[in-house]
Protein backbone atom coordinates (compact mmCIF):
# COMPACT_ATOMS: atom_id res chain seq x y z
CA UNK A 1 0.00 0.00 0.00
CA UNK A 2 2.86 2.38 0.77
CA UNK A 3 4.34 1.70 -2.67
CA UNK A 4 0.99 2.54 -4.26
CA UNK A 5 0.86 5.85 -2.37
CA UNK A 6 4.39 6.72 -3.42
CA UNK A 7 3.67 6.01 -7.09
CA UNK A 8 0.52 8.10 -7.15
CA UNK A 9 2.20 10.89 -5.20
CA UNK A 10 5.16 10.94 -7.60
CA UNK A 11 2.81 11.30 -10.57
CA UNK A 12 0.38 13.87 -9.16
CA UNK A 13 2.26 15.90 -6.57
CA UNK A 14 4.08 18.21 -9.03
CA UNK A 15 0.77 19.12 -10.67
CA UNK A 16 -1.15 19.59 -7.41
CA UNK A 17 1.67 21.71 -5.95
CA UNK A 18 1.34 24.16 -8.84
CA UNK A 19 -2.14 24.98 -7.61
CA UNK A 20 -5.71 25.20 -8.86
CA UNK A 21 -5.04 27.85 -11.51
CA UNK A 22 -2.41 25.70 -13.22
CA UNK A 23 -4.85 22.80 -13.36
CA UNK A 24 -7.63 25.05 -14.63
CA UNK A 25 -5.47 26.38 -17.48
CA UNK A 26 -4.06 23.00 -18.51
CA UNK A 27 -7.34 21.07 -18.23
CA UNK A 28 -9.47 23.59 -20.11
CA UNK A 29 -6.80 24.03 -22.79
CA UNK A 30 -6.67 20.26 -23.28
CA UNK A 31 -10.46 20.08 -23.43
CA UNK A 32 -10.44 22.77 -26.10
CA UNK A 33 -7.96 20.74 -28.14
CA UNK A 34 -9.94 17.53 -27.66
CA UNK A 35 -13.20 19.13 -28.81
CA UNK A 36 -11.37 20.68 -31.78
CA UNK A 37 -11.48 24.37 -30.96
CA UNK A 38 -8.00 24.79 -32.46
CA UNK A 39 -4.65 25.42 -30.76
CA UNK A 40 -4.80 29.22 -30.50
CA UNK A 41 -8.44 29.38 -29.38
CA UNK A 42 -7.93 26.54 -26.89
CA UNK A 43 -4.96 28.28 -25.27
CA UNK A 44 -6.77 31.61 -25.30
CA UNK A 45 -9.86 30.17 -23.60
CA UNK A 46 -7.72 28.27 -21.10
CA UNK A 47 -5.91 31.49 -20.22
CA UNK A 48 -9.10 33.54 -19.93
CA UNK A 49 -10.80 30.97 -17.71
CA UNK A 50 -7.69 30.94 -15.49
CA UNK A 51 -7.65 34.76 -15.51
CA UNK A 52 -11.30 34.87 -14.50
CA UNK A 53 -10.81 32.40 -11.68
CA UNK A 54 -7.73 34.28 -10.53
CA UNK A 55 -9.84 37.44 -10.41
CA UNK A 56 -12.56 35.64 -8.45
CA UNK A 57 -10.04 34.25 -5.97
CA UNK A 58 -8.38 37.66 -5.52
CA UNK A 59 -11.68 39.42 -4.83
CA UNK A 60 -12.93 36.58 -2.58
CA UNK A 61 -9.69 36.79 -0.59
CA UNK A 62 -10.14 40.55 -0.40
CA UNK A 63 -13.71 40.07 0.80
CA UNK A 64 -12.70 37.48 3.39
CA UNK A 65 -9.83 39.67 4.59
CA UNK A 66 -12.26 42.56 5.02
CA UNK A 67 -14.96 40.63 6.85
CA UNK A 68 -12.50 38.51 8.86
CA UNK A 69 -11.39 41.16 11.39
CA UNK A 70 -14.99 42.20 11.99
CA UNK A 71 -15.96 38.57 12.54
CA UNK A 72 -13.09 38.13 14.99
CA UNK A 73 -14.10 41.32 16.81
CA UNK A 74 -17.70 40.12 17.04
CA UNK A 75 -16.52 36.78 18.40
CA UNK A 76 -14.27 38.39 21.00
CA UNK A 77 -16.94 40.89 21.99
CA UNK A 78 -19.76 38.39 22.45
CA UNK A 79 -17.93 35.07 22.74
CA UNK A 80 -16.85 32.86 25.56
CA UNK A 81 -14.50 29.98 26.21
CA UNK A 82 -14.87 27.00 23.88
CA UNK A 83 -13.05 23.68 23.67
CA UNK A 84 -11.87 24.00 20.06
CA UNK A 85 -10.60 26.87 17.92
CA UNK A 86 -11.85 27.40 14.36
CA UNK A 87 -8.63 27.62 12.33
CA UNK A 88 -10.37 27.69 8.93
CA UNK A 89 -11.05 25.39 6.00
CA UNK A 90 -7.81 26.48 4.30
CA UNK A 91 -5.79 24.80 7.02
CA UNK A 92 -7.69 21.56 6.52
CA UNK A 93 -7.27 21.71 2.75
CA UNK A 94 -3.54 22.01 3.45
CA UNK A 95 -3.77 19.03 5.82
CA UNK A 96 -5.50 17.06 3.08
CA UNK A 97 -2.88 17.68 0.41
CA UNK A 98 -0.13 17.32 2.97
CA UNK A 99 -0.92 13.62 3.42
CA UNK A 100 0.02 10.99 0.77
CA UNK A 101 -3.52 9.57 0.82
CA UNK A 102 -4.70 12.71 -1.00
CA UNK A 103 -3.08 11.57 -4.23
CA UNK A 104 -4.78 8.19 -4.05
CA UNK A 105 -8.11 9.97 -3.51
CA UNK A 106 -7.50 12.15 -6.59
CA UNK A 107 -6.74 9.07 -8.70
CA UNK A 108 -9.81 7.29 -7.36
CA UNK A 109 -12.07 10.31 -7.97
CA UNK A 110 -10.91 10.53 -11.61
CA UNK A 111 -11.48 6.80 -12.10
CA UNK A 112 -14.91 6.92 -10.47
CA UNK A 113 -15.94 9.89 -12.62
CA UNK A 114 -14.84 8.15 -15.82
CA UNK A 115 -16.64 4.90 -14.98
CA UNK A 116 -19.83 6.77 -14.05
CA UNK A 117 -19.78 8.70 -17.34
CA UNK A 118 -19.29 5.51 -19.36
CA UNK A 119 -22.13 3.76 -17.48
CA UNK A 120 -24.45 6.79 -17.75
CA UNK A 121 -24.56 7.29 -13.99
CA UNK A 122 -23.47 10.93 -14.11
CA UNK A 123 -23.81 13.90 -16.43
CA UNK A 124 -20.84 15.73 -14.92
CA UNK A 125 -17.23 15.72 -16.05
CA UNK A 126 -15.59 17.04 -12.89
CA UNK A 127 -12.61 19.32 -13.54
CA UNK A 128 -12.54 20.76 -10.02
CA UNK A 129 -9.83 18.42 -8.76
CA UNK A 130 -8.91 20.84 -5.98
CA UNK A 131 -12.10 20.16 -4.04
CA UNK A 132 -11.25 16.50 -3.65
CA UNK A 133 -9.65 17.78 -0.43
CA UNK A 134 -13.04 17.31 1.23
CA UNK A 135 -13.19 13.57 0.44
CA UNK A 136 -9.57 13.38 1.58
CA UNK A 137 -10.47 14.90 4.98
CA UNK A 138 -13.19 12.23 5.29
CA UNK A 139 -10.49 9.65 4.66
CA UNK A 140 -8.20 11.27 7.23
CA UNK A 141 -10.98 11.29 9.85
CA UNK A 142 -11.38 7.54 9.35
CA UNK A 143 -7.61 7.06 9.31
CA UNK A 144 -7.17 9.03 12.55
CA UNK A 145 -9.88 6.98 14.26
CA UNK A 146 -8.97 3.53 12.90
CA UNK A 147 -5.40 3.67 11.60
CA UNK A 148 -6.76 1.59 8.70
CA UNK A 149 -5.85 2.87 5.23
CA UNK A 150 -8.21 0.54 3.39
CA UNK A 151 -11.22 1.73 5.41
CA UNK A 152 -10.22 5.35 4.73
CA UNK A 153 -9.99 4.75 0.98
CA UNK A 154 -13.32 2.90 0.87
CA UNK A 155 -15.04 5.86 2.56
CA UNK A 156 -13.35 8.43 0.30
CA UNK A 157 -14.25 6.47 -2.84
CA UNK A 158 -17.87 6.25 -1.74
CA UNK A 159 -18.08 10.01 -1.29
CA UNK A 160 -16.45 10.68 -4.67
CA UNK A 161 -19.21 8.52 -6.16
CA UNK A 162 -22.07 10.10 -4.19
CA UNK A 163 -20.81 13.65 -4.73
CA UNK A 164 -21.48 13.34 -8.45
CA UNK A 165 -25.13 12.45 -7.85
CA UNK A 166 -25.85 15.61 -5.84
CA UNK A 167 -23.79 17.66 -8.31
CA UNK A 168 -25.93 16.30 -11.15
CA UNK A 169 -29.15 16.95 -9.24
CA UNK A 170 -28.37 20.63 -8.73
CA UNK A 171 -27.25 21.07 -12.35
CA UNK A 172 -30.24 19.19 -13.79
CA UNK A 173 -32.56 21.49 -11.84
CA UNK A 174 -31.03 24.23 -13.95
CA UNK A 175 -29.79 26.39 -11.08
CA UNK A 176 -26.25 27.08 -12.41
CA UNK A 177 -27.66 28.11 -15.80
CA UNK A 178 -31.09 29.64 -15.13
CA UNK A 179 -30.11 31.60 -12.02
CA UNK A 180 -26.37 32.19 -12.30
CA UNK A 181 -26.13 32.14 -16.09
CA UNK A 182 -23.55 29.36 -16.55
CA UNK A 183 -24.65 27.10 -19.40
CA UNK A 184 -23.56 23.42 -19.36
CA UNK A 185 -21.87 23.99 -16.00
CA UNK A 186 -22.21 22.05 -12.74
CA UNK A 187 -20.99 23.21 -9.34
CA UNK A 188 -18.75 20.54 -7.82
CA UNK A 189 -17.60 21.06 -4.26
CA UNK A 190 -17.88 17.84 -2.36
CA UNK A 191 -21.03 16.42 -0.80
CA UNK A 192 -21.91 19.83 0.62
CA UNK A 193 -23.69 20.46 -2.71
CA UNK A 194 -26.53 18.56 -1.03
CA UNK A 195 -27.43 21.85 0.67
CA UNK A 196 -28.76 22.86 -2.75
CA UNK A 197 -31.25 20.00 -2.45
CA UNK A 198 -32.07 21.11 1.10
CA UNK A 199 -32.61 24.70 -0.06
CA UNK A 200 -34.85 23.42 -2.86
CA UNK A 201 -37.06 21.63 -0.31
CA UNK A 202 -37.15 24.67 1.99
CA UNK A 203 -37.94 26.83 -1.03
CA UNK A 204 -40.92 24.62 -1.88
CA UNK A 205 -42.12 25.00 1.72
CA UNK A 206 -41.72 28.78 1.61
CA UNK A 207 -43.72 28.82 -1.62
CA UNK A 208 -46.74 27.65 0.41
CA UNK A 209 -46.45 30.42 3.03
CA UNK A 210 -48.25 33.66 2.03
CA UNK A 211 -45.55 36.01 3.28
CA UNK A 212 -42.73 34.25 1.45
CA UNK A 213 -44.51 32.64 -1.52
CA UNK A 214 -43.20 35.26 -3.94
CA UNK A 215 -39.53 36.05 -4.55
CA UNK A 216 -39.99 39.71 -3.73
CA UNK A 217 -36.85 40.92 -2.00
CA UNK A 218 -34.43 40.30 -4.84
CA UNK A 219 -31.55 42.74 -5.42
CA UNK A 220 -33.38 43.96 -8.52
CA UNK A 221 -36.57 44.60 -6.57
CA UNK A 222 -34.76 46.39 -3.77
CA UNK A 223 -32.97 48.59 -6.29
CA UNK A 224 -36.19 49.35 -8.16
CA UNK A 225 -38.18 49.97 -4.98
CA UNK A 226 -35.57 51.85 -2.97
CA UNK A 227 -33.34 53.28 -5.67
CA UNK A 228 -29.62 53.52 -4.91
CA UNK A 229 -30.04 51.49 -1.69
CA UNK A 230 -30.42 48.37 -3.80
CA UNK A 231 -27.22 48.91 -5.76
CA UNK A 232 -24.47 46.40 -4.87
CA UNK A 233 -22.03 49.08 -3.68
CA UNK A 234 -24.56 50.80 -1.40
CA UNK A 235 -25.92 47.51 -0.10
CA UNK A 236 -22.38 46.36 0.73
CA UNK A 237 -21.73 49.68 2.46
CA UNK A 238 -24.86 49.37 4.61
CA UNK A 239 -24.03 45.82 5.66
CA UNK A 240 -20.43 46.84 6.40
CA UNK A 241 -21.69 49.73 8.52
CA UNK A 242 -23.97 47.51 10.60
CA UNK A 243 -21.31 44.81 10.99
CA UNK A 244 -18.63 47.31 11.96
CA UNK A 245 -20.83 48.96 14.57
CA UNK A 246 -21.84 45.57 15.97
CA UNK A 247 -18.17 44.57 16.21
CA UNK A 248 -17.35 47.80 18.05
CA UNK A 249 -14.77 48.87 15.47
CA UNK A 250 -13.15 52.32 15.40
CA UNK A 251 -15.12 54.63 13.09
CA UNK A 252 -12.33 54.70 10.52
CA UNK A 253 -12.24 50.89 10.42
CA UNK A 254 -16.02 50.87 10.00
CA UNK A 255 -15.71 53.08 6.91
CA UNK A 256 -12.96 50.86 5.50
CA UNK A 257 -15.12 47.78 6.08
CA UNK A 258 -17.94 49.51 4.20
CA UNK A 259 -15.60 50.19 1.29
CA UNK A 260 -14.27 46.63 1.22
CA UNK A 261 -17.71 45.03 1.21
CA UNK A 262 -18.90 47.47 -1.46
CA UNK A 263 -15.83 46.65 -3.55
CA UNK A 264 -16.46 42.92 -3.31
CA UNK A 265 -20.14 43.26 -4.29
CA UNK A 266 -19.19 45.31 -7.34
CA UNK A 267 -16.12 43.40 -8.58
CA UNK A 268 -17.05 39.76 -8.03
CA UNK A 269 -19.83 39.71 -10.65
CA UNK A 270 -17.38 41.25 -13.12
CA UNK A 271 -14.80 38.52 -12.51
CA UNK A 272 -17.47 35.83 -12.77
CA UNK A 273 -18.45 37.36 -16.09
CA UNK A 274 -14.91 36.88 -17.40
CA UNK A 275 -15.07 33.19 -16.51
CA UNK A 276 -18.52 32.82 -18.05
CA UNK A 277 -17.49 34.43 -21.36
CA UNK A 278 -14.49 32.12 -21.67
CA UNK A 279 -16.45 29.03 -20.62
CA UNK A 280 -19.16 29.46 -23.25
CA UNK A 281 -17.19 28.34 -26.34
CA UNK A 282 -15.54 25.50 -24.40
CA UNK A 283 -18.78 24.20 -22.91
CA UNK A 284 -20.65 24.49 -26.23
CA UNK A 285 -17.90 22.69 -28.14
CA UNK A 286 -17.62 20.03 -25.43
CA UNK A 287 -21.38 19.53 -25.50
CA UNK A 288 -21.43 19.09 -29.29
CA UNK A 289 -18.44 16.76 -29.14
CA UNK A 290 -19.97 14.53 -26.46
CA UNK A 291 -23.33 14.41 -28.22
CA UNK A 292 -21.60 13.27 -31.40
CA UNK A 293 -19.49 10.65 -29.60
CA UNK A 294 -22.13 9.32 -27.21
CA UNK A 295 -25.34 9.42 -29.25
CA UNK A 296 -26.70 12.66 -27.90
CA UNK A 297 -25.39 12.51 -24.33
CA UNK A 298 -24.71 15.95 -22.88
CA UNK A 299 -22.18 16.54 -20.12
CA UNK A 300 -21.94 19.31 -17.58
CA UNK A 301 -18.46 20.58 -16.80
CA UNK A 302 -17.89 20.48 -13.04
CA UNK A 303 -16.21 23.65 -11.76
CA UNK A 304 -15.66 25.47 -8.48
CA UNK A 305 -18.86 27.32 -7.39
CA UNK A 306 -16.58 30.24 -6.50
CA UNK A 307 -17.56 31.67 -9.88
CA UNK A 308 -21.09 32.26 -8.53
CA UNK A 309 -20.38 33.74 -5.08
CA UNK A 310 -20.38 37.26 -6.50
CA UNK A 311 -24.17 37.34 -6.71
CA UNK A 312 -25.48 40.15 -4.54
CA UNK A 313 -27.87 37.84 -2.66
CA UNK A 314 -25.00 35.50 -1.74
CA UNK A 315 -22.68 38.23 -0.49
CA UNK A 316 -25.44 40.02 1.42
CA UNK A 317 -26.44 36.72 3.08
CA UNK A 318 -22.80 36.04 3.96
CA UNK A 319 -22.48 39.27 5.88
CA UNK A 320 -25.86 38.90 7.59
CA UNK A 321 -25.11 35.33 8.67
CA UNK A 322 -21.95 36.31 10.57
CA UNK A 323 -23.76 37.39 13.76
CA UNK A 324 -26.42 34.70 13.31
CA UNK A 325 -23.82 31.92 13.26
CA UNK A 326 -22.35 33.34 16.46
CA UNK A 327 -25.81 33.33 18.06
CA UNK A 328 -26.30 29.67 17.11
CA UNK A 329 -22.96 28.80 18.72
CA UNK A 330 -23.96 30.50 21.97
CA UNK A 331 -27.52 29.17 22.33
CA UNK A 332 -27.22 25.54 21.16
CA UNK A 333 -26.29 23.34 24.15
CA UNK A 334 -23.10 21.31 23.83
CA UNK A 335 -21.44 23.54 21.22
CA UNK A 336 -17.67 23.01 21.35
CA UNK A 337 -16.44 25.88 19.18
CA UNK A 338 -17.41 29.34 18.05
CA UNK A 339 -17.18 30.22 14.34
CA UNK A 340 -14.08 32.29 13.71
CA UNK A 341 -11.78 31.88 10.71
CA UNK A 342 -14.51 30.26 8.61
CA UNK A 343 -17.28 32.78 9.28
CA UNK A 344 -16.97 34.72 6.01
CA UNK A 345 -15.94 31.61 4.04
CA UNK A 346 -19.38 30.08 4.59
CA UNK A 347 -20.49 31.90 1.44
CA UNK A 348 -19.49 28.67 -0.35
CA UNK A 349 -22.59 27.12 1.25
CA UNK A 350 -24.93 30.08 0.95
CA UNK A 351 -24.30 30.07 -2.82
CA UNK A 352 -26.36 26.86 -3.07
CA UNK A 353 -29.27 28.43 -1.17
CA UNK A 354 -29.75 31.58 -3.26
CA UNK A 355 -30.80 29.92 -6.53
CA UNK A 356 -33.65 27.71 -5.18
CA UNK A 357 -34.97 30.85 -3.45
CA UNK A 358 -34.82 32.83 -6.71
CA UNK A 359 -32.44 35.37 -5.23
CA UNK A 360 -34.96 36.59 -2.65
CA UNK A 361 -32.76 37.77 0.21
CA UNK A 362 -35.41 37.14 2.88
CA UNK A 363 -36.10 33.57 1.73
CA UNK A 364 -32.38 32.91 1.33
CA UNK A 365 -31.69 34.24 4.81
CA UNK A 366 -34.42 32.03 6.32
CA UNK A 367 -32.93 29.01 4.57
CA UNK A 368 -29.37 29.76 5.64
CA UNK A 369 -30.44 30.35 9.25
CA UNK A 370 -31.83 26.79 9.30
CA UNK A 371 -28.69 25.50 7.57
CA UNK A 372 -26.51 27.24 10.15
CA UNK A 373 -28.43 25.73 13.06
CA UNK A 374 -28.20 22.20 11.68
CA UNK A 375 -24.49 22.61 10.94
CA UNK A 376 -23.82 23.90 14.45
CA UNK A 377 -25.42 20.76 15.89
CA UNK A 378 -23.33 18.61 13.52
CA UNK A 379 -20.25 20.43 14.78
CA UNK A 380 -20.75 18.99 18.26
CA UNK A 381 -19.79 15.62 16.77
CA UNK A 382 -17.41 16.74 14.02
CA UNK A 383 -15.18 19.05 16.10
CA UNK A 384 -13.32 16.24 17.95
CA UNK A 385 -12.79 14.37 14.68
CA UNK A 386 -11.46 17.52 13.00
CA UNK A 387 -9.06 17.96 15.90
CA UNK A 388 -7.98 14.35 15.41
CA UNK A 389 -7.04 15.14 11.81
CA UNK A 390 -5.00 18.15 12.98
CA UNK A 391 -3.15 15.94 15.47
CA UNK A 392 -2.60 13.30 12.79
CA UNK A 393 -0.89 16.00 10.73
CA UNK A 394 1.29 17.02 13.67
CA UNK A 395 -0.52 20.20 14.72
CA UNK A 396 -0.57 20.84 18.46
CA UNK A 397 -2.97 23.43 19.83
CA UNK A 398 -3.71 24.12 23.49
CA UNK A 399 -7.45 24.42 22.91
CA UNK A 400 -7.68 22.03 19.97
CA UNK A 401 -8.29 22.75 16.29
CA UNK A 402 -11.44 22.56 14.19
CA UNK A 403 -13.14 24.17 11.19
CA UNK A 404 -16.72 25.46 11.06
CA UNK A 405 -16.66 24.78 7.31
CA UNK A 406 -16.49 21.05 8.03
CA UNK A 407 -19.67 21.22 10.12
CA UNK A 408 -21.64 21.82 6.91
CA UNK A 409 -20.10 18.75 5.23
CA UNK A 410 -22.41 15.91 6.18
CA UNK A 411 -19.99 13.42 4.67
CA UNK A 412 -17.72 14.29 7.61
CA UNK A 413 -20.50 13.35 10.02
CA UNK A 414 -21.08 9.94 8.46
CA UNK A 415 -17.35 9.27 8.08
CA UNK A 416 -16.75 10.07 11.76
CA UNK A 417 -19.50 7.71 12.92
CA UNK A 418 -18.05 4.98 10.72
CA UNK A 419 -14.59 5.56 12.16
CA UNK A 420 -15.79 5.60 15.77
CA UNK A 421 -17.62 2.30 15.30
CA UNK A 422 -14.93 0.60 13.24
CA UNK A 423 -14.19 -1.92 16.00
CA UNK A 424 -17.74 -3.24 15.64
CA UNK A 425 -18.06 -2.77 11.89
CA UNK A 426 -14.73 -3.98 10.58
CA UNK A 427 -13.81 -3.58 6.92
CA UNK A 428 -16.86 -5.57 5.87
CA UNK A 429 -19.17 -3.24 7.78
CA UNK A 430 -17.55 -0.12 6.32
CA UNK A 431 -17.88 -1.58 2.84
CA UNK A 432 -21.53 -2.49 3.39
CA UNK A 433 -22.43 1.00 4.65
CA UNK A 434 -20.81 2.73 1.69
CA UNK A 435 -22.29 0.24 -0.79
CA UNK A 436 -25.77 0.83 0.65
CA UNK A 437 -25.35 4.62 0.38
CA UNK A 438 -24.01 4.30 -3.16
CA UNK A 439 -26.86 1.93 -4.06
CA UNK A 440 -29.44 4.46 -2.87
CA UNK A 441 -27.86 7.16 -5.04
CA UNK A 442 -27.63 4.75 -7.97
CA UNK A 443 -31.30 3.79 -7.63
CA UNK A 444 -32.40 7.41 -7.91
CA UNK A 445 -30.11 7.89 -10.92
CA UNK A 446 -31.39 4.77 -12.69
CA UNK A 447 -34.96 5.92 -12.03
CA UNK A 448 -34.09 9.27 -13.61
CA UNK A 449 -32.52 7.52 -16.64
CA UNK A 450 -35.65 5.40 -17.15
CA UNK A 451 -37.94 8.42 -16.91
CA UNK A 452 -35.74 10.35 -19.33
CA UNK A 453 -35.71 7.44 -21.84
CA UNK A 454 -39.51 7.17 -21.68
CA UNK A 455 -39.91 10.91 -22.19
CA UNK A 456 -37.56 10.84 -25.20
CA UNK A 457 -39.40 7.86 -26.70
CA UNK A 458 -42.76 9.61 -26.25
CA UNK A 459 -41.43 12.78 -27.85
CA UNK A 460 -40.00 10.80 -30.79
CA UNK A 461 -43.32 9.02 -31.35
CA UNK A 462 -45.27 12.28 -31.59
Image: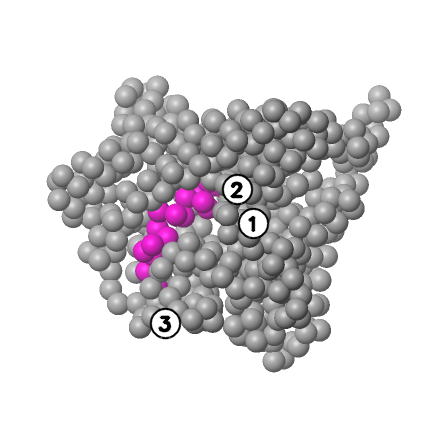
| Contact check, label 3 and label 2, Cβ < 8 Å | no
Residue under the point 34% across and 70% down: 397
Disc 3 vs disc 2: which is toward the camera?
2
Residue furthest right in the image:
461
**Disc 2 on helix, strand or loop?**
helix
Residue furthest bottom in the image:
423
| Contact check, label 2 and label 1, Cβ < 8 Å | yes
- Does the segment drawn in magenta span residue 373? no
**Disc 1 on helix, strand or loop?**
helix
- Whole-percent x and y of residue 231? 32, 24
**Disc 3 on helix, strand or loop?**
loop
The Cα–Cα distance between marks 3 and 1, rounded to whole angstroms, is 29 Å
Q: Residues within 10 Å of mark 1 (few under 14, many from 20)?
A: some
* Quarter where residue 298 is shown: top right
Q: Say which mark, if any, is on residue 396.
A: 3
- Whole-percent x and y of residue 50? 50, 35
Question: Which label's residue is closer to the chain start, 2 or 1?
Answer: 1
Image check: 178 left or right of 32? Answer: left
Question: Which label's residue is closer to the chain start, 3 or 2?
Answer: 2
Residue under the point 37% across and 66% down: 401
- Which image quarter holds the C terminus? top right
Q: Say which mark, if any, is on residue 187.
A: none
Image check: 422 left or right of 179? Answer: right
Magenta stretch in the rendered image: 335-353
- For disc 1, the marked residue is 15
- Whole-percent x and y of residue 161? 66, 53
Q: Nearer the viewer, residue 5 or 415?
A: 5
Image check: 227 left or right of 220? Answer: left
- For disc 2, the marked residue is 22
The Cα–Cα distance between marks 2 and 1, rounded to whole angstroms, is 8 Å
Residue under the point 29% across and 31% down: 262
Amino acid sequence: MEGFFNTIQTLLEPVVNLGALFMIFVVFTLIGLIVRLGIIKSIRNGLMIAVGFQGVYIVVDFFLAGVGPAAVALTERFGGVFTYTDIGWGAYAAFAFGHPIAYAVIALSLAVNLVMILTNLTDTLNLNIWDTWEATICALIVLALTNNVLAALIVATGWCYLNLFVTDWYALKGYPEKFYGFKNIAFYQGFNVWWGMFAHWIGNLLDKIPGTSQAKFTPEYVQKRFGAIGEPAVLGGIIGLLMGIGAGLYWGDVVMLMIKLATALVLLPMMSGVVMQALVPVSEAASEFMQAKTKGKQLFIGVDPAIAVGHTSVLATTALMVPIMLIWAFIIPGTLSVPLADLPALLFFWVFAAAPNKGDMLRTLITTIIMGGLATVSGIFIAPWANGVAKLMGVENVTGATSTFLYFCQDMLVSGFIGENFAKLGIAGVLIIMIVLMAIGTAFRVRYNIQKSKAMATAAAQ
